[in-house]
Amino acid sequence: MEKFFKTIRSKVEAGQRISEADALALFESNDLLAIGELAATANRQKNGERVFFNVNRHINYTNLCVNRCAFCAFSKEAGQSGEYTLALQDVREKAQQAADAGATEIHTVGGLHPELPFEFYLDMLRTIKEVSSGLHIKAFTAVEIDYFAQLAELSIPAVIEELKQAGLDSLPGGGAEILGQVVRDKICPEKISGARWLEVTEAVHRAGLKSNATMLFGHLEEYADRVEHLRLLRELQDKTGGFQTFIPLAFQPDNTRVPGAKGVGGVDALKTLAISRLYLDNFQHIKAYWVMLGLKIAQTALCFGVNDLDGTVVEEQIGHDAGADSPQALNKAGIIELIRKAGRLPVERDTLYNELKVY
Ligand code: V47
Ligand code: SF4
């Protein structure tokens, strides 16, 4: 075993932080099994044998978007074939189907629509709560929050307050991509800066709402960009404690416009999940999102430090438009079996990680 790895192992076993240099050395190492075993140890210290899942439904309310990020196959321009915007009645029906199917969470995000007024988003939240006040609404990324603030000519705290009043319960982790600006300018030049994403997220946490954080990897970024991204998230988490889970999203290249994108193999996916577990010591959960990883890598990730599997998604669009070959949905029995067959204990949770049922 190489010397640097022994140093990292002793830090992890003593519950100490690993440094950016340690994380970079791990990314550059090919000793996947050693990294995975250490991440599994770190996870066991935090979460034992439990693996969380939740029953949710995604509602992507529109694919029209003024940003048109190069990595995004989901968004469309006005007038382009395949563009859509859901009416409130469609949202109501989808929320009702979700509630009938036992979902506890609605995950709703969309493109930055060129015309909808801020009131539409408030009505959408109210509509979902009318279907069932018990449905947790995890909605809107920091990118959408910033857009609404411009649209409504309100401050970020005022926008968050209005959304909260209308039913917003927490935020998903999208829009983070790679926070470092050099890469960000290449893959999503129109999107809010990495610094702004962090600023809006800090305001969300200060308003008492939890959120998640993602990282889109496997395009133009270097390992150093991933490490910088993790550092910025760990620093914000030290300040606010508002993040619940970290979700590395494996880049899906079909129908996208990122020349030279590297793509994500199984080794890279597992290594990235494991290093995230090791570096983000102040995040309780690391989530494998099977839609982007595929079911088999997502299941294997449970041996590499992951303790959360998302989700029983119905009708996912963002990853599938970009060529993800995972199924459209997985039912509860399927996800429980996946976790059990990895030798772990399936636990259904709500969005805020309260345990609902141990299987
Ligand atoms: O921000 C877009 C990503 C995100 C592609 O918080 C792509 O629980 C891969 O954030 N290949 C939205 N990824 C999805 C998201 C998410 C998903 C699941 C759970 C949670 C959570 C959040 O999807 C975007 C972007 O980073 N994305 N295009 C693509 N071609
Ligand atoms: Fe729009 Fe989001 Fe797609 Fe970027 S990733 S083009 S902001 S929908």
Image (cartoon, rainbow, N blue to C red):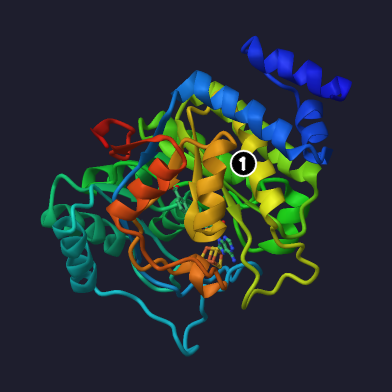
Above or below, 51 against 251 in this view is above
The N terminus lies in which quarter of the figure? top right
Q: Give the quarter of the image for residue 41.
A: top right
Q: Give the quarter of the image for residue 63.
A: bottom left
The C terminus lies in which quarter of the figure? top left
Q: Mark 1: give few (<14), some (14-19) or many (20+) Cα within 10 Å.
A: many
Residue 308 visible here: yes
User: Which residue: 30% across, 60% down?
Assistant: 121
- Is 47 in front, or is 95? 47
The amino acid type found where label 1 is placed reads Leu
Residue 279 visible here: no
Q: Position of residue 47 (x, y in %)?
A: 45, 24
User: Which residue: 61% across, 56% down?
Assistant: 250
Residue matched to label 1:
273
| Residue 332 left/right relative to 327 | left
Q: Position of residue 226 (x, y in %)?
A: 72, 43
- Is 91 in front, or is 194? 91
- Is 40 in front, or is 193? 40
Badge 1 element: helix
Q: Position of residue 82 (x, y in %)?
A: 44, 86
- Is 302 in front, or is 62? 302
In this rendering, the count of numbered labels is 1
Q: Give the quarter of the image for residue 118.
A: bottom left
Q: In the image as oriented, which residue stretches furthest toward the right?
A: 3
Q: Position of residue 173 (x, y in %)?
A: 49, 46
| Residue 308 left/right relative to 53 | right
